[in-house]
């Protein structure tokens, strides 16, 4: 019985490809007996008006898109409208939390910043203040850490704080909302 199914499928395939012309330099080889049998079966298929079963394949899964977010610098807006960036620069977006990195080593500061941003994103905080100090390694490192892999996905924008909030020694950070 399985041989009968295989023959029927072969005939259906031949019937489906009957109008296809082979590529240049290629020929379709078929035994004389097979040609005669194929012609008879094709006539039966046409006479009965049986439709060959269409092979329905599920749509291909889209390839995962790796979105690399553009690096941010102080005051840039990737995915944020200009009005929001202006409000952030002017300190018009209320700061909901502060992180003071004074006295931390680089490893401690990076860990604290990552945990802080994750917690603030989970708490749906919009703008936070990260205090780095006006001089030193942390002031130079924090913008790079905000662009680093786990933190960049949480940050929409950042800019230097107003003088009343620490000036060049602090950053306003706009945290991305969780959808």
Image (cartoon, helix red, strand yellow):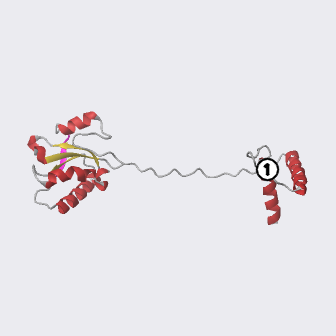
Q: Residue at x 50, y 51 (%)?
A: 63
Tell me the quarter of the picture where residue 79 sits.
top left
At mark 1, the secondary structure is loop
Above or below residue 107? Residue 48 is above
Tell me the quarter of the picture where residue 106 sits.
bottom left
Q: Position of residue 47 (x, y in %)?
A: 88, 45
Q: Residue at x 24, y 51 (%)?
A: 144
Q: Residue at x 25, y 37 (%)?
A: 84
Q: Residue at x 14, y 47 (%)?
A: 170
On the rendered structure, is 58 left or right of 18? left
| Numbered range of the magenta stretch | 93-98
Q: Foreground residue, 169 or 58?
A: 169
- Among all residues in the image, which is located at the extreme top? 83
Q: Foreground residue, 94 or 69?
A: 69
On the rendered structure, is 72 left or right of 163? right
Query: Principal SS element in the magenta part?
Result: strand
> For the N terminus, which image quadrant?
bottom right
Above or below residue 11? Residue 78 is above
**Does residue 99 appear anywhere in the picture?**
no
Q: How many neighbours does mark 1 have within 10 angstroms: few (below 14), some (14-19), or many (20 or more)? A: few
**Does residue 11 appear anywhere in the picture?**
yes
Q: Position of residue 142 (x, y in %)?
A: 20, 52
Q: Position of residue 145 (x, y in %)?
A: 24, 53
Residue assigned mark 1: 27
Q: How many marks?
A: 1
Q: Position of residue 103 (x, y in %)?
A: 10, 60
Give yes or no for residue 26 being in the magenta stretch: no
Above or below residue 88? Residue 65 is below
């Amino acid at each position: 019985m399985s041989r009968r199914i295989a023959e029927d499928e072969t005939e259906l395939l031949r019937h489906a490809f009957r109008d296809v012309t082979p590529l240049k330099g290629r020929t379709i080889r078929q035994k004389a007996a097979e040609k005669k049998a194929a012609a008879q079966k094709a006539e039966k298929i046409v006479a009965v008006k049986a439709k060959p079963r269409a092979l329905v394949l599920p749509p291909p899964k889209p390839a995962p898109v790796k979105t690399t977010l553009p690096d941010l610098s102080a005051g840039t807006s990737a995915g944020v409208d200009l009005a929001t960036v202006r409000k952030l620069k002017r300190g018009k977006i209320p700061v909901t939390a502060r992180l003071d990195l004074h006295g931390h080593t680089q490893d401690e500061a990076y860990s604290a910043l990552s945990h802080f941003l994750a917690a603030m994103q989970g708490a749906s905080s919009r703008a936070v203040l990260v205090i780095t100090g006006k001089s030193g390694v942390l002031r130079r490192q924090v913008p790079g850490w905000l662009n680093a892999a786990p933190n960049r996905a949480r940050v929409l924008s950042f800019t230097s704080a107003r003088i009343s909030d620490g000036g060049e020694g602090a950053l306003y950070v706009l945290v991305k909302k969780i959808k």
